[in-house]
């Protein structure tokens, strides 16, 4: 019998790892075989023993960090199903921004075939690389000089003023509900 679910995470500041571990813990507590592992440790053979591969990563500069490589590894494996979750500092309430993000990163076919979830997380300047900190500081500096700011500009400016964590166990519910339903359906 194949293992059910493996969650592969690519985490720079810790939020994606935190969510991957929460999801694996929730699934395991319901008696569903689920494990999480760092993206760096993944080999095609190691995921071929799973029915479902979930890739978790961050939104980075408007892109899904590591998505193409993760998708390629999945396609070369014998795993049956692929799902995706992305973490970011944008609050879950910003539906239009999140919808636009998915449309910019996934083709129409991928949007319909790949279950995808956005999980708000936060910013952790202490764990960011220098280039990411500089990119955020540059965007913030441009906003400070803007004469007419939109509501989103003001929210963004406040959001990047320091480290914060808005992640919550409640945000994994759509992911775990989907996975539980999928495992039940497959049984």
Image (cartoon, helix red, strand yellow):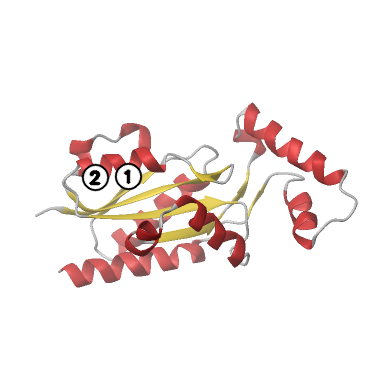
Q: Residue at x 60, y 29 (%)?
A: 129
- State the SS at label 1: helix
Q: Position of residue 118 (x, y in %)?
A: 50, 58
Mark 1 lies on residue:
71
Side of 137 where 83 appears, left or right:
left
Give the CA distance from mark 1 to mark 2.
Answer: 6 Å
Q: Position of residue 49 (x, y in %)?
A: 16, 46
How many numbered discs?
2
Side of 82 where 87 appears, left or right:
right
Q: Position of residue 69 (x, y in %)?
A: 35, 37
For label 1, the crowd category at 10 Å Cα-Cα, with few meaning under 14, some 14 to 19 and many 20 or more, is: some
Pointers 1 and 2 in contact (C-beta within 8 Å):
yes
Q: Relative to the observer, which residue lies in front, 31 or 133? A: 133
Q: Residue at x 54, y 55 (%)?
A: 101
The answer to whether residue 134 is seen in the rendering is yes
The answer to whether residue 38 is seen in the rendering is no
Question: Please, is residue 41 above or below residue 90 in the view?
Answer: above
- State the SS at label 2: helix
Q: Residue at x 63, y 64 (%)?
A: 94
Side of 124 where 82 appears, left or right:
left
Mark 2 lies on residue:
75
The quadrant holding residue 109 is bottom left
Q: Relative to the observer, which residue lies in front, 62 or 129? A: 62
Q: Position of residue 180 (x, y in %)?
A: 29, 68
Q: Relative to the observer, which residue lies in front, 54 or 100? A: 100
Q: Residue furthest left?
A: 1
């Amino acid at each position: 019998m194949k293992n059910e679910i493996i969650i592969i995470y690519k985490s720079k500041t810790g939020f994606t790892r935190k969510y991957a571990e929460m999801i694996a813990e929730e699934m395991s507590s319901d008696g569903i075989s689920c494990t999480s592992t760092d993206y760096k440790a993944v080999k095609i053979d190691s995921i071929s023993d799973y029915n479902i591969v979930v890739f978790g990563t961050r939104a980075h500069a408007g892109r899904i960090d590591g998505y193409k490589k993760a998708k390629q590894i999945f396609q070369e494996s014998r795993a049956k199903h692929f799902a995706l979750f992305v973490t970011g500092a944008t609050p879950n309430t910003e539906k239009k921004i999140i919808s636009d993000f998915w449309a910019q990163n996934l083709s129409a076919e991928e949007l319909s075939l790949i279950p995808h979830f956005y999980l708000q997380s936060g910013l952790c300047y202490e764990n960011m690389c220098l280039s990411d900190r500089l990119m955020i500081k540059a965007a913030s500096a441009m906003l400070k000089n803007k004469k007419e700011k939109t509501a989103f500009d003001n929210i963004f400016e406040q959001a990047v003023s320091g480290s914060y964590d808005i992640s919550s166990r409640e945000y994994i519910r759509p992911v775990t509900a989907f996975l539980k339903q999928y495992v039940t359906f497959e049984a």
